[in-house]
Amino acid sequence: MQTPSPPLVSVPASSRDWPGWRGPVGNGVAAHSSLPLNWSTSEGIIWKTSVSGVGNGSPSIWGQQLFLVTADNEAETVSLACYDTNDGHREWSTQLVQGSFGRKHQKNTFASTTPACDGTHVYVTCVVDDTLWVTAVGMNGKIAWKTETGPFYANHGYSASPVVDKSLVFVSGEHKGYGTIGKLAHTSFLAALDTTTGKIVWRVRRSNGDSYNSPVIARVANRSQLLLAGPELIIAHDPETGKELWSCRWVAERPASTVIFDAEHVFAAASHPDSEILCIAADGQGDVTETHVRWSKKKGGTDVPSLLEVDGLIYSIHDQGVATCLDAKTGDVVWRTRLRGNFTASPVVADGRIYATNEDGTTYVFQAGREYSQVAMNQLAEPVLASPAISNDQIFIRTDQSLICIGASKHDVLAEGQKESSIR
């Protein structure tokens, strides 16, 4: 095992940054934000910029820089683009990899991951030529290193985002491969790379099966845990060594939503082949299936949208639009209601209000609490599969062709039909 090197520069994240998938802590919660309640195609839009290429990956934000992963399907290239959060102009775009894209689900893209940033580098995961690559890009757009972490092949493509903690970046390569005797069979892995050099610090075997969710670093049950919900097993690892801390069996065969947590528990959801929401006490060791499962619900489990935990309540937005609130201690249903449309984006919460965006670009805003209380419904009239990012009291939403900043603007509101910011 190699000893990880310290980062080139130690840059603390601001409470207003959104440095990776699902925000500062990886749970969809924005701290110290007072977000707008109402917007439309003609109101509340600070700026709107066209985005070249395709992708469903969410934005990540550090300071005034916003990062998006994009793919050119014809050229079979994956790039990282940086935008100025003040006016939406593109500062730079860097091609990361080129190679055969392979197969994917119709809703997936070859740029469905969210970059992770630590203020020194931006880290991107993507798959070409049946290989999972991790690339570190400097804040100026220059590639610092690129590492081939291992083989990867899944029928629905790749979508797991990286996560950074201290001097390590963690990536999931959980997949089934071509078959039981194929060259990529039984090669699932979870790996930690040195953020400065890109060298693999540790790499461990994972369950043989497809998984589309992302790893999470959490301080839960008084210890740091690297959490990943895999096919048939949810496993917590020691982030420093990769050693398994505990595991729990569950129903999922190809999980897609990322786990969440509170101070003592881990919550996971799945809907394939059957629905399940699970609460696990995170202080165990070994197989904790029979000893640490606090509750399990067979209804309300999501496929792609991840859960939210707010003040002892769990919120689930099902892919087909059923919103459910559960008591985090007991799993009892507090309320359930139906929202219009289908959902792929994961909900976020700020200032006690939950923002849930459906695939038609309609965002439902409702108060977190023991009764469903909707406060707004806002329409962008553009397809949205990416989850929103929150920074500096503004919401950043990636549509199928655009990047949109929503908030209280000091400038003139962009009117419908007005010329949009151009990509530079």
Image (cartoon, grey):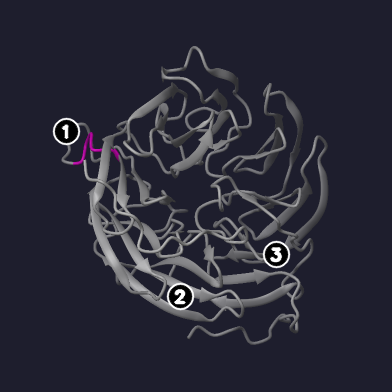
Q: Residue at x 29, y 37 (%)?
A: 176
Residue linked to disc 3? 393
Q: Nearer the viewer, residue 7 or 69?
A: 7
Residue 193 visible within the image: yes
Q: Is residue 370 magenta?
A: no
Callout 1: helix, strand or loop? Answer: loop
Q: Which residues are magenta?
A: 184-189
Taking 305 as reference, is 230 above or below it? above
Residue linked to disc 1? 181
The reply to whether the C-beta atoms of the residues labelled 2 and 1 are less than 8 Å apart is no
**Between marks 2 and 3, how big is the CA–CA gap?**
26 Å
The N terminus appears in which quarter of the rendering? Answer: top left
Residue 270 visible within the image: no
Identify the disc placed on residue 52.
2
Identify the disc placed on residue 406.
none
Q: Residue at x 38, y 74 (%)?
A: 141
Circle 3 crowding by C-alpha within 10 Å: few under 14, some 14–19, many from 20: some
Taking 49 as reference, is 381 above or below it? above
Comparing labels 2 and 3, the label whose residue is closer to the camera: 3
Q: Earlier in the sequence, mark 2 or mark 3?
A: 2
Q: Residue at x 43, y 60 (%)?
A: 10
* Callout count: 3
Q: Is residue 76 left or right of residue 233?
A: left
Q: Is residue 185 magenta?
A: yes
Where residue 284 appears, x then y in whole percent? 47, 20
Callout 2: helix, strand or loop? Answer: loop
Where residue 41 appears, x then y in whole percent? 72, 72
Q: Earlier in the sequence, mark 2 or mark 1?
A: 2
Q: Amino acid at mark 2?
A: Ser
